[in-house]
């Protein structure tokens, strides 16, 4: 489940207090504005859950309830981020994320996911925009390159690619970047 789907499921489970118990709590219609999920996304999730027999409704989709199967499986389905790799390449910062799942997690969510970000985008922004939001689950599935790779060649290529842009801003910073990368390489040997 993506983070917004997990939040919606947990809010619905908390509001109902148990399966087949819509009268006890609030309906999805009431929860949607409260948790801040897009209305169309919420309807898509309710339809998806209804197709899995996790959710049932009478006439109106957003006035339904969680089924026994949904109650059990929503509690068990989760994805776990196991590894993140950042690789500097000439075309950008390549981010690889390895995901494992438990419970009823779609196969497409599991394994390695990959996305390229522009050089210069801080890792904190990448982590906030890509990892925390769960967007990595919709990124293309692609394995990182097998290791070991020639680290010296990668460092030389990264320095050659990034150094002119950094030096244009500040020659001291460009020199510092080169020294830092080469020092890191020496420590890896």
Image (cartoon, rainbow, N blue to C red):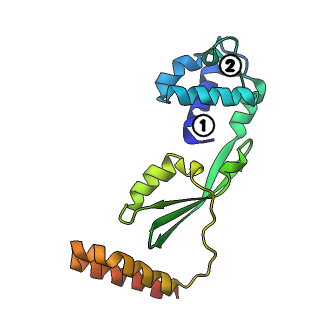
Q: x, y percentage for residue 94?
A: 50, 65
Q: x, y percentage for residue 59?
A: 67, 11
Residue displayed at 61% across by 81% down: 148
Q: Is residue 120 above or below residue 22?
A: below
Q: x, y percentage for residue 140?
A: 59, 55
Q: Which mark is residue 30?
A: none
Secondary structure of the residue carrying numbered label 2: strand
Badge 1: residue crowd in 10 Å (few <14, some 14–19, many ≥20)? some
Residue positioned most to the front: 91
Image quadrant containing the N terminus: top right
Residue position for label 2: 65
Q: Is 189 in front, or is 108?
A: 108
Secondary structure of the residue carrying numbered label 1: helix
Q: x, y percentage for residue 145?
A: 61, 73
Q: CA distance from mark 2 to mark 1?
A: 16 Å
Q: How many numbered discs?
A: 2
Q: Earlier in the sequence, mark 2 or mark 1?
A: 1
Left or right of 138: which side holds 48? right
Residue displayed at 44% across by 56% down: 126
Q: Which mark is residue 6?
A: 1
């Amino acid at each position: 489940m993506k983070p917004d789907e997990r939040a919606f499921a947990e809010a619905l489970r908390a509001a109902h207090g148990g399966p087949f118990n819509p009268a006890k709590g609030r309906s999805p219609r009431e929860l949607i504005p409260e948790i801040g999920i897009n209305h169309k996304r919420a309807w898509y999730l309710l339809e998806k859950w209804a197709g899995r027999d996790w959710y049932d409704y009478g006439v109106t989709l957003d006035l339904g309830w969680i089924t026994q199967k949904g109650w059990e499986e929503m509690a068990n389905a989760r994805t776990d981020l196991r590894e993140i790799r950042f690789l500097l390449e000439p075309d950008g910062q390549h981010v690889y994320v390895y995901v494992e799942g438990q419970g009823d997690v779609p196969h497409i969510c599991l394994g390695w996911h990959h996305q390229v970000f522009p050089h210069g985008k801080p890792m904190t922004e990448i982590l906030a925009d890509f990892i925390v939001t769960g967007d990595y689950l919709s990124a293309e599935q692609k394995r990182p390159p097998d290791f070991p790779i020639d680290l010296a060649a990668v460092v030389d290529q990264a320095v050659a690619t990034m150094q002119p842009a950094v030096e244009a801003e500040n020659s001291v910073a460009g020199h510092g970047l080169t020294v830092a990368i080469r020092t890191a390489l020496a420590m890896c040997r």
